[in-house]
Image: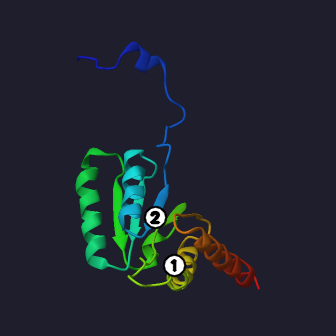
Amino acid sequence: MLCTMSLKDHLIHNVHKEEHPHAHNKISVVGVGAVGMACAISILMKDLADELTLVDVVEDKLKGEMLDLQHGSLFLRTPKITSGKDYSVTAHSKLVIVTAGARQQEGESRLNLVQRNVNIFKFIIPNVVKYSPHCKLLIVSNPGLFRVAYQEVWYRIVFSSV
């Protein structure tokens, strides 16, 4: 019988099974505009997660972007790419990147735009924290919206323990 194992294989045995360095490492991206998709593609190209989830309110665009990533990911290591309009798809994320926000409409004041974005963040952040309470948030948006995200997270932490 032909032996296919080398002498080294007979003598040296691994006592610790090596795991993928990013085992159970889920990253979610909220917002599939140009910035959100740039983040998603970078995550895939750098092999930063074993699961990537996209969230957006525009379902047709969301589905199209997810399918594009899934087709292209055949040549990458990220085994699972999912998407959804409901924030439950972000459950157990270690990192959530928030790129969502309203675009300024013609003739709209910056103050009105900021208020619309504040309202968007007041919806997004509690939903993210609900499903991934221990995640890190990366806010890729106007600096003023970081404060809104911080306040929403702080509020949930303080009042959930009461």
Name the spot of residue 80 as percent of width and height, x first. Answer: 35, 58
Q: Position of residue 50 (x, y in %)?
A: 42, 53
Image coordinates for residue 45, horizontal then vertical, percent: 37, 46
* Residue that numbered label 2 is attached to: 28
Q: Residues within 10 Å of mark 2 (few under 14, many from 20)?
A: many
- Residue occupying the far top of the picture: 7
- Residue type pointed to by label 2: Ser
Mark before the other along the chain sequence, 1 or 2: 2
Q: How many marks?
A: 2
Q: Quadrant of residue 150?
A: bottom right
In front: label 1 or label 2: 1
Residue highlighted by disc 1: 124
Q: Residues within 10 Å of mark 1 (few under 14, many from 20)?
A: some
The residue at 23%/17% (across/down) is: 2
Q: What element does badge 2 sit on?
A: strand
122 relative to 27 in the view: left or right: right
Viewer-side residue, 123 vs 7: 123
Image spot of residue 157 (x, y percent): 70, 77
Residue drawn at point x = 57 percent, y = 78 percent: 130
| Residue sitting nearer the eye, 34 or 125 | 34
Q: CA distance from mark 1 to mark 2?
A: 12 Å
Residue 114 lies left or right of residue 155; in this view the side is: left
Residue 48 higher or lower than 92, as above or below: above
In the image, residue 53 sits, relative to residue 84, either above or below, namely above
Kind of residue sitting beneath label 1 = Ile
Tell me, yes or no, if residue 93 can be seen here: no
Q: Is residue 119 above or below residue 32?
A: below
From the image, which quarter does the C terminus lie in? bottom right
Task: Report the quarter where the N terminus lies.
Answer: top left
In the image, farthest residue toward the front: 107
Q: Residue furthest right?
A: 162
